[in-house]
Amino acid sequence: MTDSAALFVGISITVIALWIALVFRGVPIGNVIDYFKKNSKIFSGIKFAIIFSIFFVAVGYISGCSTSSGTYLNSATVYSGIDYSLVRPSPQCTSEGVDDRSTSNLGLKVNLFTSTDRKYKTNLKYTHHSCAFNPDQNLYDAVGIEFEYGFWER
């Protein structure tokens, strides 16, 4: 595995572990294990995220990558867009109105680190989702960290 691929997988797994430790701080480890046994779909989702990362990094490695040294604070971007939900209604929308599937999204990303080969990036981000045309059922506002591994860039 190349340095940037190992960095992506390592940081992804570390952040998942730290996030679990933060969420379950002060909870005895036996209770945490019981929680995941009782809620096996949640634990399956965590395992899927780790396996997903490793699998796609392996695909990227096979396609040929290089190093992990890099640069910091390379970019800041804003985005806005509209999504069409595959479920009806969208989790953000009530069913009263003209369109219960279109969801608006907007956000901000600040790049913290980019590897020299530009395949691995760590970004801070803010995300907002709400219903585009119907009254909102749920709003989604969150801040987070994102780990990105690219296969090619022109």
Image (cartoon, rainbow, N blue to C red):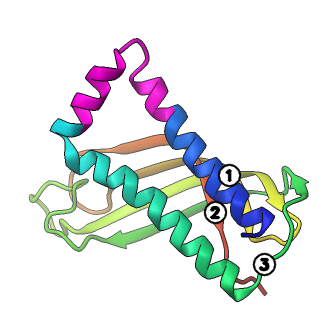
Farthest-out residue, left: 96
Q: Magenta segment, principal secondary structure? A: helix
Q: CA distance from mark 2 to mark 3?
A: 14 Å
Disc nearest the viewer among 2 and 3? 3
Q: Which mark is residue 65?
A: 3
Left or right of 139, for residue 65: right
Q: Which mark is residue 123?
A: 1
* Residue located 51% across and 57% down the image: 106
Badge 2 marks a residue whose secondary structure is strand
Badge 1 marks a residue whose secondary structure is strand
Left or right of 23, for residue 15: right
Left or right of 113, for residue 5: left
Badge 3 marks a residue whose secondary structure is loop
Residue 29: quadrant of the picture: top left
* Residue 43 spot, x, y in % from top left: 30, 46
Quick one: quadrant of the N terminus?
bottom right
